Amino acid sequence: MAGIIVYVLGKDGEFNKNSLGAISKAAQLAGELGGEASAVVVGESFDDAKLAELGKYGAAKVYKVTGPEGVAQPVVDAIEKIAGENDIKYALFGGGLLGFEIGAGLTARLNWGVTAEATGIRAEGGKLIVERPVLQDSAIVDVAYKGDGGVIVSRLNAFEPNDSIGAAGEVVDTPVDFKDFSLRAKLVSRGVQEGADVNIEDADVIIAGGRGLGEAANFSLADDLAASLGGTVAATRAVVDAGWFPYAGQIGQTGKTVAPKLYLALGISGAIQHKVGMQASENIVAINKDPNAPIFEFSDLGVVGDLHTIAPKLTEAIKAKKG
Ligand SMILES: Cc1cc2nc3c(=O)[nH]c(=O)nc-3n(C[C@H](O)[C@H](O)[C@H](O)COP(=O)(O)OP(=O)(O)OC[C@H]3O[C@@H](n4cnc5c(N)ncnc54)[C@H](O)[C@@H]3O)c2cc1C
């Protein structure tokens, strides 16, 4: 028998979807291992009635810990205590930076193994086997744990929530003596990522900007062109990492896959990791000052030149043509 514990967090009175998906997966797996799934919630954002709702998603018990919310170390303290007092062999996190931080801390504290970026988990011979993509997602490996237990951090939303697994969960008040160092960080505020609602997957026309734009302000060239064509602006990872554009608009292997009628690249080299996210576009047009840029190898139309000169002229020409 081996139990699985899931850290759950939420915002504005609702639990995160990826936390709920992780509980649903844990409940299915715990059933196959002959144990039970439980949830741990640290903070004071949810009352007992709301916490008990986690039972619908498969949490037989909900450990309610009063303490600092949204920081990693108090959760490590809480899970260390709960796992030590109960038959819990695995901790599952539904992804996200906090999940990675808690998962790493817990692994060190309990001397368990850890697998990050899991996309699948199955029970086999009374143990969990974790499926994890490797080599830039070109292969999947199976990971098993040698020691006492395992930490699993999944990719965000890897598992679908299922609210018809159980009835109300038993809410267990769980006092925890936090370590001194666990209380040194506190959550000051939570923000909303600007541009998080950028929707590029449904766009017919995409103007994608890369490092060749030179600086964040020059995305206005892409904005103007997109406005003239009725399109949407997207970006490469290089500029997203530089903070020039929101992650929600990133095309590629670690971003989104798009297939618009027209994809127009401004200052994008055409790295393989970008190409895999846009190669299915119907018409690919690239403006790049380097005639040897890889993007020209898979463009329908290539324009060699300085985008700072060409993009405004193109916008003007399109506007003039549209009258
Ligand atoms: C594991 C992994 C995952 C990755 N995932 C992604 C992903 O999901 N998406 C992604 O996009 N990348 C991804 N990358 C990064 C990828 O390898 C490239 O580094 C990135 O795509 C390059 O972005 P870029 O084309 O904007 O910049 P660069 O490669 O720097 O290209 C800039 C281009 O602009 C041109 N240029 C410069 N000035 C001008 C000008 N004035 N006028 C016209 N052209 C100009 C240059 O000639 C150059 O070709 C990933 C990398 C790794 C290792």
Image: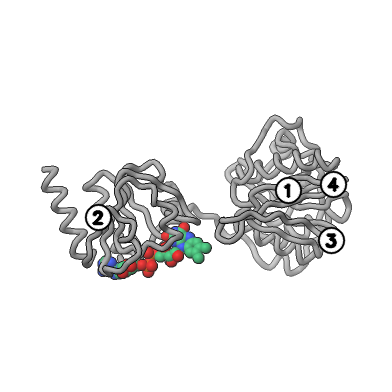
Which residue matches tag 1? 6
**Quadrant for the N terminus in the image:** top right
- Residue name at image x 84 percent, y 46 percent: 125
Residue 86 % position (x, y): 87, 50
Q: Residue furthest front?
A: 297
- CB of mark 1 near ligand 1 (< 8 Å): no
The CA distance from mark 4 to mark 3 is 14 Å
- Residue name at image x 69 percent, y 60 percent: 102
Residue 137 % position (x, y): 56, 56
Label 4 neighbourhood size at 10 Å, few (<14), some (14-19), many (20+)? Answer: some
The CA distance from mark 2 to mark 4 is 57 Å
What amino acid does circle 4 point to? Gly
> Front-most of 124 and 100?
124
CB contact under 8 Å: marks 4 and 3 = no
> Front-most of 67 and 37?
37
Mark 4 vs mark 3: which is more N-terminal? 4
Residue 149 % position (x, y): 82, 56
- CB of mark 2 near ligand 1 (< 8 Å): no
Which residue matches tag 4? 126
- Residue name at image x 88 percent, y 53 percent: 85
The CA distance from mark 2 to mark 1 is 50 Å
Which residue matches tag 3? 147
Of the residues tagged 2 and 1, which is closer to the observer? 2
Of the residues tagged 1 and 3, which is closer to the observer? 3
Residue 293 % position (x, y): 32, 67
Instruction: Choose top left, top right, bottom left or bottom right for residue 171.
Output: top right
Mark 2 vs mark 4: which is more N-terminal? 4
Label 2 neighbourhood size at 10 Å, few (<14), some (14-19), many (20+)? Answer: few
What amino acid does circle 1 point to? Val
